[in-house]
Amino acid sequence: MSVDALLESLTLEEKVGQVLMVGMEETYLSPALKARLERFHVGNVIFLGRNYVDPRQMRAFTDDLQRLAAARRTPIGFLTAIDQEGGVVARLVRGGTTVFPGNMALGAVGDPELARAASRVMAEEMRALGLNMNLAPVLDVNNNPANPGIGVRSYGEDPALAARLGAAAIEGTQGAGVMATAKHFPGKGDVTIDSHLDLPTVPHSVERLNRVELVPFRAAIEAGVGAIMTAHVFFPAYEPEPLLPATLSRNVLTGLLRDELGFEGVIITDDLFMGAISKRFGLGEAGIMAINAGADIVLMCHDPGEQEKAIGEILTAAREGRIARERLDSAVRRVLEAKARFGLLEPEISDGTAPKVGSPASRKLALDIARRSIALVRNADGLIPFDVEGRGNVLVVCVDVSSLTMVEDAQLGASPLARAVRTLVPSAEETRVSQSPGEKEIRDTVESASGRDLVIVGTYNGHLYPAQAELVKALAEVGPPVVVAMRNPYDIAGFPEIGTYVAAFGFRDCSMQAAAEVVFGKVDPVGTLPVTIPGLK
């Protein structure tokens, strides 16, 4: 059946279902979830870390969802979406899946072919689990070190680099049959507020936005990206109504993205539960406004009860004409066209064999990228490479790896850096400290570090947590440490006197292993900083 004929066959309620994407609490298709999806004819779902146990469970879950779709009056496959960016935002990190370094590590390498290869492998593993839409890549140009929500999720501060690597990632993803999603349009790299918490503003002129923020999105459109996700950010250059986020702005979504940039794919909102929206608008009201502004899918990740109320309000608005029939049909048509393009109109169900993920070749690729990404920013003390022969009294001081933004899943408290160091120096000891270590923690850590042959300190966004800088400075008083930035590379701005500093661009095992290998001379550091560190000479 053609898309037009399919669209014509749908009821109003079924059309509304196709413009919804909802999050779930379950790890399987429970009777309650099935009833909720059926009651509202929901056509698209998003999986978060809470929904994933292992590959076999995920494939069973997605198969059951597609069986549900196949049994409907008009069978149309679900979009099954997930945030698998790599690096700090990756939902599929258990059960043997391949976990790649994130975007800024790829920016430090600068090779589009590796960005394409990594994205292809991630997409192939997603397909094996029944996932057909990746809410990636991030195309925000991170030119503000104080940005709390993007940082290493960005390729860097150079718009042209982000454009090249982003386009390659899109081609790799979609070449493997998964729809890519460029985010967060028109770009939220230059903000100091996390939109999960409140509404940021990007105050720049149209000229500046065209020169910086929009460059990667133009490249994404040229590369044929299937979807673009909106930013919950206010852009006064395009929107005269004060504090109206891009997600709800017709000037941004229709005027800029559709009419000026010529994007014909699916426009999907970021999660409407985020503080930038929820503090100012009701969930249902925001959904209605987003659709009227030009969004084709509204994303609601949390709280099933609130979702149901919002969906009811959206349905009422569609029935009463507050969402014009032509606008709704246009949104549904784009969703159906995207599903047709990626072979998803007919629900895709596996043959029941165990999904294959995490091949040795894929793991080698992830580690190779990580090895090429590590940047030796400063080596004034000559500590790297460190010859451990006869000097094995090594201490690793590691800040707890924790979730710093709401887009991240809960992280394990164990030290990935210490684990990596012990693969090379089995006798190495570790001390863990909190994200903002107190005075006693610092004193105790300094005492433990005294008399060591080498102290390695793993910081974690220390540029935003001043107590980490105090820890590093205190440790330097008993001997020069090697500092490894396990997330954003800006940490050295807080302790510019430190002589040895390594940027790893992420805490995943592959990046920590590569950083340890650089410290002990197993591989040469060849990564380059894709961002400017304030005050660094």
Image (cartoon, rainbow, N blue to C red):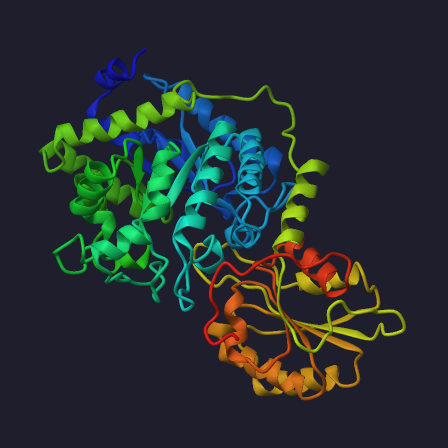
Q: Position of residue 256 (x, y in %)?
A: 21, 43
- Report whether 342 appears left or right of 265: right
Using the image, determine if residue 84 lies above or below residue 3. Answer: below
Can the viewer see residue 11 in this picture?
yes
- Report whether 78 appears left or right of 106: left
Quadrant in which the N terminus is drawn: top left
Work out whether residue 241 or residue 27 is closer to the camera in this orientation and state it: 241
Query: Going by the picture, which residue comes out furthest to the front?
Result: 537
Quadrant location of residue 57? top right
- Report whether 167 appears left or right of 479: left
Q: Residue at x 79, y 73 (%)?
A: 394
Query: Going by the picture, which residue comes out furthest to the right?
Result: 390
Q: Residue at x 45, y 28 (%)?
A: 65
Using the image, determine if residue 319 lies above or below residue 460. Answer: above
Using the image, determine if residue 451 lies above or below residue 174. Answer: below
Query: Going by the picture, which residue comes out furthest to the top?
Result: 1
Quadrant location of residue 81? top left
- Report whether 380 appears left or right of 312: right
Work out whether residue 519 or residue 378 is closer to the camera in this orientation and state it: 378
Q: Position of residue 22 (x, y in %)?
A: 36, 40
Q: Position of residue 478 (x, y in %)?
A: 71, 87
Can the viewer see residue 32 in this picture?
no
Using the image, determine if residue 362 lies above or below residue 286. Answer: above
Q: Residue at x 85, y 74 (%)?
A: 391
Quadrant location of residue 13? top left
